Image (tube, helix red, strand yellow):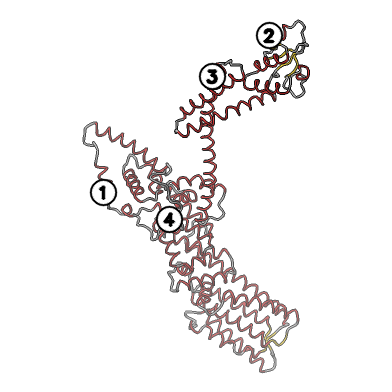
Amino acid sequence: MEPMVVRASDSAEQREVRPSLFRMDSDFRRRAGVDPLSMFGAAAIDTFGGGRSAARFLAWRSGGTAGQSEGGQPTVTLPDGETYRTSDPGLDSTDVAKAGGNIVAMAVPATWAARVGQARNLGIGRRAALQGTAAATADTGLQAVFNAGEIDPTRTALAGAGGAGGELAGTVIGRIGGKAMEFARSMGSNREAARALAREAGIENVSPDQLARLSNAMEEIRAGADPRAILGREEFGFIYTQGQRLTEGARKFQQLSREEVLRQTPVSNGPMLQAEQSNRRALSDALAGMGERFGGRPGSTPAELAQGAASRLGQQADELSGRISAAYETAGQGGRSAVSAEAVAGLPNRLRNAVREFAPNFDTTPATARTLEQVRLATQNILKSAEGGNVTGVTLRALETQRRILNNNINAATNRADRAAMVAVKREFDGWLDEAVDTALVTGDPSALAAMKEARALRAEFARRFEGGADSDRFIAGLLDGSRTPEELVNIALGAGQVSKSGAARFIERLRVAANGDPEVIGRLRAAHFERMTRGNNGEPLNMGQIIRNIRSSEYSNASVVKALYSPDEWGQVRRLAASLEPLVARGEFGRTSGTAERLMRTFLGQGLNGVPLLGPAMESVRGALNAVRAARAVSDPVRAHGGAHPGVPAGFTAGAGAASRED
């Protein structure tokens, strides 16, 4: 029996419409006398057939009437006149439950349609049509079951459109999400690969900015770019053409051949020449920055840097010598300490024997000859006074006065040999004084002895740092007295001196001891060594191939000196510079002035329509414009995958490719 349908406002007695009868707190079921199973059925009809069908069903079960409120919501009016909505205005929990139920109901046909589309490998258009058909069919079936056979074509059409649209939207969102996930994974992978590349290059503390730039470049490396070129671009600012960045032989040769044609063509060689000029500036900046970090000074030559190291060492020796003199002077104040007269007797001969190799005389070594004669006469007077009983010893104050005389005579020496001989006299005098204090001290109060102890400790420090009998000891002494030049020190560091490679390293370590670990001294020598490897006599950077050869030669033939001069981080940067320069150096036929590549280039340049009136110049103008674009792209475009992926970052790539290539 079909219930009567009326508007709630048409009732004779106007009453307020109650909230949704499906609410948990609704009294509809109690007032209507509807059993729970009927309510469950009404809820299913409301979900899949619609609110009007549910209202008609409940009106039939309760003996009431179905209608709609002024807002258009389906209603049920009971025989007692109470009216209930099937759904409250706006979005409520009932609406959410209905939407969820429809989604679950549509999931089965949607899944079936997706499997069919996948099995038949359908395109997105056919998959959308299949999903739309499945959704429309499912909705028609639901309406037929829960809507008493009534089919709403509009609802069916909307269901079909929703199914098709859902497939399209899902595919697009899936692809976007997949790309996003792939990008996120690739970024994470790129960052790890960038860290590994930095570690391989010896960059342990890579900055966040460096890591970000290297991460962005990892795709280019996977596409076949040389990791050395990527690092050189990021660390030193070098510009590499695509041919210089490639690693695969045939592809690299083809690209370099095309670039050589562009480089030799006046219309299109601008980007190539600009890149070369930029690289020369970048190399100069890199050498200047590294030289300063290694301990150099802007604009200083290797000779000036080595002279600075020697001067600094001399300042240290003079400072320590001054402290020794001050301590001896304190010990000798007031004549409180003295050594026996007999201890002085052998001093003249001892000093003369110390400088026998210089053959002191008043013509070639006048300061030394005068000093020896002055000491002889002073000693003779002391011994005569002792024989008469007037003198029993020589005070330390008098001996310190003699030390000052020796220092003044060193400064008065007018040539290198005379100065070296005077330094030897002073050194022997200090040694004699140490022994005399040990064996012949006849007087000395506690304060004088304390000052003497300090003086002797300082004297021992001086001997440890600046004296000795080995070749390296004599070389240090020679730097102080001027008999050895700082240039010789640089030659020893470069392996060009008259000492072995291991001996050169010992000389450097001996210099470190003499300087008492002063970083300025070793820094100046290190910077001088680096300048000699990378710059010519005019101060300009050497060509890139020569720099690579010098660095490789130092590393493989003079490793002990490298280890003595550079820390691992410092030499790691030098190695990275050499590795970054490798791709920029022309090699093989591109490094010779006449070869197949050049002949091909000339052939290419000789072809065309140059001889055809009007057409030839026009074609050349077009070709020139195209070549200019190609040249700019060769310089600026990244390397892209071609014929397979790059095998990965080669182990030990920073060591270079062996012997450096030839360069024009």
Query: Which label is found at residue 599?
Result: 1
Image quadrant where residue 60 sits: top right
- Residue drawn 47% across the image and 31% down it: 117
- Residue beneath label 3, please? 157
Task: Give the label, 4 or 3, closer to the camera.
Answer: 3
Q: Earlier in the sequence, mark 4 or mark 3?
A: 3
Task: Give the label, 1 or 2, closer to the camera.
Answer: 2
Rendering coords of residue 222 (x, y %)? 45, 47
Residue type at the position of mark 2: Met
As rendered, which of 479 and 192 lies closer to the eye?
Answer: 192
| Structural distance between the alpha carbons of marks 4 and 2 | 103 Å
For label 2, the SS is: loop
> CB of mark 3 within 8 Å of CB of mark 1?
no
Task: Give the label, 3 or 1, closer to the camera.
Answer: 3
Query: Which label is found at residue 541?
Result: 4
Task: Give the label, 4 or 2, closer to the camera.
Answer: 2
| Structural distance between the alpha carbons of marks 3 and 1 | 72 Å
Q: Earlier in the sequence, mark 3 or mark 2?
A: 2
> CB of mark 1 within 8 Å of CB of mark 2?
no
Q: Image quadrant for the C terminus? A: bottom left
Q: Earlier in the sequence, mark 1 or mark 4?
A: 4
Residue type at the position of mark 4: Pro
Residue type at the position of mark 3: Ala
